[in-house]
Image (spheres, rainbow, N blue to C red):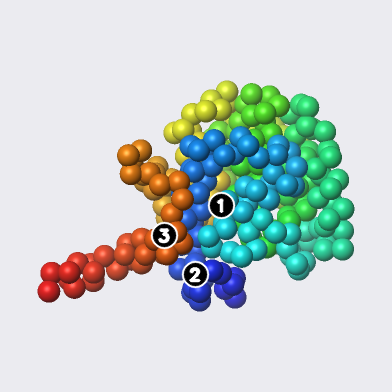
Amino acid sequence: MVLENKLDLTDSSELARVEERISKIKALELFESGLLDTFEVGTFVGLASIHKHLFGEVYSFAGKIRDKNIAKNDFQFAPLMYLDASLDYVSKMPQSNFDEIIEKYVNMNVAHPFREGNGRSTRIWLDSILKNELGQVVDWSKVDKEDYLLAMQRSPVKDVEIKALLKDALTNKINDREMYMKGIDASYRYEDQYIYKTEDLALKPQLQQQSRSLGDRLFDYQSECHSSKTNDIAHK
């Protein structure tokens, strides 16, 4: 089943490619524009702002609380009837040290407030808390995919593994652009999205546009997929 989207795409593979490309560009914009630093830190409001920026050009539900129950690998995320209360609880959880921050992250993951894009947006949210409170972020490129997924699967019952895994990957390079881009790529790889590298999608400064229309982005994607055909037509 293909998620309803603003691009009217009906093929799940095509939608995944477009979503990855657009949202990675938007993730880089968050960093380079400084917009991420203006969002609330450690609250659902802040997370919703991140999610809306990443996926707002693809999904109408971006930044909005999901309206149905969801599960993954037989794990049921917070039921709708308790979701608002869960998000309020997580937003108010303390975040003054590493253990508290990871516990907060684990609880937000259990809440899983969005229909899609929870992991990618919540990892950026986690880094914003770590940056604000500890002056550190996670170097996600050092966090093995299988180790991470297994630790997160176990975290609602036992969070020792995820704490140890992420603590070993902490870095003081909170403003390092290259590390941020590699981290975004690693984060997307956890979700099996690795067609594009954020570095390759980055525009040259003199050509960079902070806000491009949805039509332009879709045109770019279609042009990329059909470049050979387009070139043939252009030379006729």
Give the residue displayed 50% in from the left and 38% down from the top. 33
Q: Are marks 2 and 1 in contact (CB under 8 Å)?
A: no
Going by the numbered disc 2, the residue's amino acid type is Leu
**Relative depth, front residue between 217 and 68:** 217
Establish if 213 lies above or below 229: above
**Split into 4 quadrants, where in the image is the N terminus?**
bottom right
Dot 2 or dot 1, earlier in sequence? 2
**Relative depth, front residue between 61 and 111:** 61
Mark 1 — residue?
A: 54
Establish if 205 lies above or below 150: above
Dot 1 or dot 3, earlier in sequence? 1
Residue 128: percent from the left, percent from the top?
Answer: 64, 35
Residue 41: percent from the left, percent from the top?
Answer: 71, 37
Mark 3 — residue?
A: 217
Residue 62: percent from the left, percent from the top?
Answer: 63, 59
Mark 2 Cα shell of 10 Å, populated few (<14), some (14-19), many (≥20) = some
Residue 182: percent from the left, percent from the top?
Answer: 47, 39
What label sits on residue 7 in the rendered view? Answer: 2
Going by the numbered disc 1, the residue's amino acid type is Leu
Element marked by disc 3: helix
- Gap between marks 3 and 2 measured at Cα: 10 Å
- Gap between marks 2 and 1 measured at Cα: 15 Å
